[in-house]
Image (cartoon, rainbow, N blue to C red):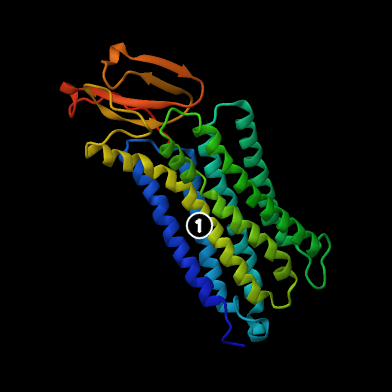
Amino acid sequence: MAADNNGPAMTITMVVCTVFSFLFMALRFYCKQTLSTKLGLDDAVLAFSWILFLVFVILSIHSTKYGLGKHFADVDLTLLPQLLYFLPIAQFFAVLSVAISKSSFILTLLRLVTRPWQKASLWFMLITINMSMFSISIVQFFQCAVPPTPGCVDGNHVIGLGVFAAGYSAVMDLVLTAFPSLVIWNLQMQLREKIGVIVSMSLGVVAGVIGIYKSSTIPYVARSADFTHGTAIVLIWLVAEVAATILAASIPFYRPLIRRATTARGTKESYGMGRVAGSHGHSKLSSQHDITREHIDEQPLTNTAVVRKTEINIEYDQWSDHEAGKVPGQSRREIF
């Protein structure tokens, strides 16, 4: 039974997820810097969530020294106090990392949506996700031991709150995947461009599915006498959920860089909009309005009809031929 140890598998999974999530997040920041876009609050929140994630990974891997991943029968009981000391701290940072990484994506969506009910819904999810996750991260430290201490929280209540917080967070991941469709679908874009943007912004569904499965394992593991073995499996799913959230929050920001590279090779500009005659530049998705332009491929810009609808902004940075490569038009803030 000693050979059946989840510790090595947990360690490898954590290292791989940590490295990949960092690379994807770093590429997100690189894309924004390349496009001369300032990093925003959502970027800072995402970076902070990764730091918490890293602390969680380090503490979890360190806990394998004290028996995490082994069957309880194989654990050196003299090391059990150290394991019970580090494990709740690791889980504290893990839970906060889950909540804050999801908060980053919600903050990004808040910069895109325009309708009051959409903003209210996103704020509601932002507040409730953080409240539920922060509550379980604190309550776990007050779980009753044997013998129970005055003022401690019954273990069943802690388990119930943990299942609720994890399940609620996972369900909100699935709900959040609907918002890109609400924002993008009515834009004046080619169908394949719409689908590409929506899919790239809806990858959080992966984190939602992982979170739902993880929440279903919590009661069994928490009540199991062999918790040292089962907890490692829960932490594997937890680290996968955080990594999936960071990846899903980063991938949508790669599209402008890809589109700029494509445009540099002489192809038509992104998001289904042709190049304005006699000018250079690129279009980009940003915030509040949908601008459709008629006859832009053949007519000069002065004859272009502009119809402005309150949906989202498709901005076009342009400059005349004699200014190309010298003094580009003023670049405006983009989201991705």
**Quadrant showing the N terminus:** bottom right
Q: Is residue 205 above or below residue 34?
A: below
Answer left or right for 226 relative to 237. Answer: right
- Nearer to us in this view, 157 or 285: 285
- The spot of residue 26 in percent (x, y) is 38, 51
- Nearer to us in this view, 54 or 286: 286
Residue drawn where x is 54% and y is 62% of the image: 239
Residue drawn where x is 56% and y is 47% of the image: 102
- Nearer to us in this view, 254 or 278: 278
Mark 1 lies on residue: 243
Q: Seen from this angle, which residue lies furthest top?
A: 303
Under mark 1, the amino acid is Ala
- The spot of residue 330 in percent (x, y) is 30, 24
Answer left or right for 169 relative to 305. Answer: right
Q: Is residue 247 above or below residue 79?
A: above
Residue drawn where x is 62% and y is 67% of the image: 234
Q: Is residue 92 above or below residue 258?
A: below
- The spot of residue 7 in percent (x, y) is 55, 76
Residue drawn where x is 64% and y is 61% of the image: 213
- The spot of residue 154 in percent (x, y) is 81, 62
